Amino acid sequence: MQTTDLVSIITPMYKGAAFVGETIESVLAQSYQNWEMIIVDDCSPDDGTGIAEVNKYTSDPRIKLIASKENRGSSGARNIALKEAKGRYIAFLDSDDIWHHDFLEKQLNYMKKCNAPLVFSSYRRIDENTKEELLKPFIVPSKVSYRSLLKTCPIFPSTAIYDTQKTPKIFFNEELGSMRDDYVYWLKMLKDIDYGYGNPEILVDYRMRKSSVTGNKSKVIVPQWNVLHKVEKLGLIRSAYYLGCWAIISYFKYQK
């Protein structure tokens, strides 16, 4: 397996039996085939049903399953996979999301076109069971910077790829558990690069719960504040300003 243009796909899994098979199938169907997929089961309390589902596909040597012996949250599971990753490119794909068949090809081409260290795409928002579109597709901005990311984060992990030759491989802050850990990840990266670039094409299907459509962000307000005030150390006034921006933008993000 060549590592020069290899894409390492990082997939954390927790109680993933219902959907992970379709997620893997979407990777197998990719028009770009130089990839490895590292799936980490985060000590799921499902009697091994998720692991059994993944094992149906591990005859393909590109698919690697790691069973964590302790529950470490999505950040910890992703870190386990990142330590094993051999590719130049790092991509993230949650165990219930679906890539369109040309996702990798188009994102890598877009990365070359923009000479970008980080790219992400637009995506559909579908019901987890019926695949009905719950909201109109989320169309990403053409680029983001650290400063714009403080106001809102348009980078959905399952749409993102970065080039480790242009920005170092970084690891997730496990102290954050599974709440805002991906947001802090992108903030950290954007401190070292000028921009991440958004591909307007819709290349991913994101499964979401119908309850999320209401845009109820109350349980995320405190973690969001902690990121701004405690992790990024922005001070009270700036933290309050960016929290207000985030709240307003999030409200409109979840309107039908």
Image (spheres, helix red, strand yellow):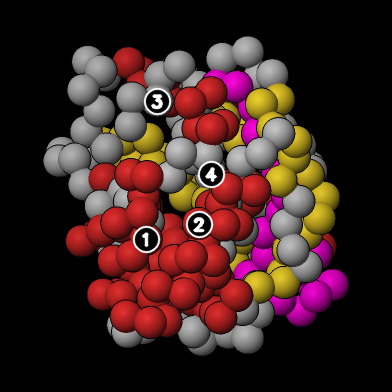
Relative image position of residue 127 (x, y in whole percent): 60, 22
Q: Which residue is mark 2?
A: 247
Asked which secondary structure carries label 3, the reply is loop
User: Is 237 on the left-hand or right-hand side of 114?
Assistant: left
Which residue lies at the image location 78% right of the left edge and 44% below the top edge? 202
Query: Residue 47 occupies which quadrant of the picture?
Result: top left
Q: Which residue is mark 1?
A: 224
Q: Which kind of residue does numbered mark 2 sit on?
A: Ala
The reply to whether the C-beta atoms of the residues labelled 1 and 3 are less than 8 Å apart is no
Given residues 236 and 100, the one toward you in this image is 236
Name the residue that disc number 3 marks.
16
Q: Position of residue 20 (x, y in %)?
A: 49, 26
For label 1, the crowd category at 10 Å Cα-Cα, with few meaning under 14, some 14 to 19 and many 20 or more, is: many
Identified by mark 4, the residue type is Leu
Q: Earlier in the sequence, mark 3 or mark 2?
A: 3
Highlighted magenta segment, given as a residue range: 110-128
Rounded to the nearest angstrom, the CA distance separating label 4 from label 2 is 26 Å
Q: Does residue 191 sit above or below 109 in this rendering?
A: below
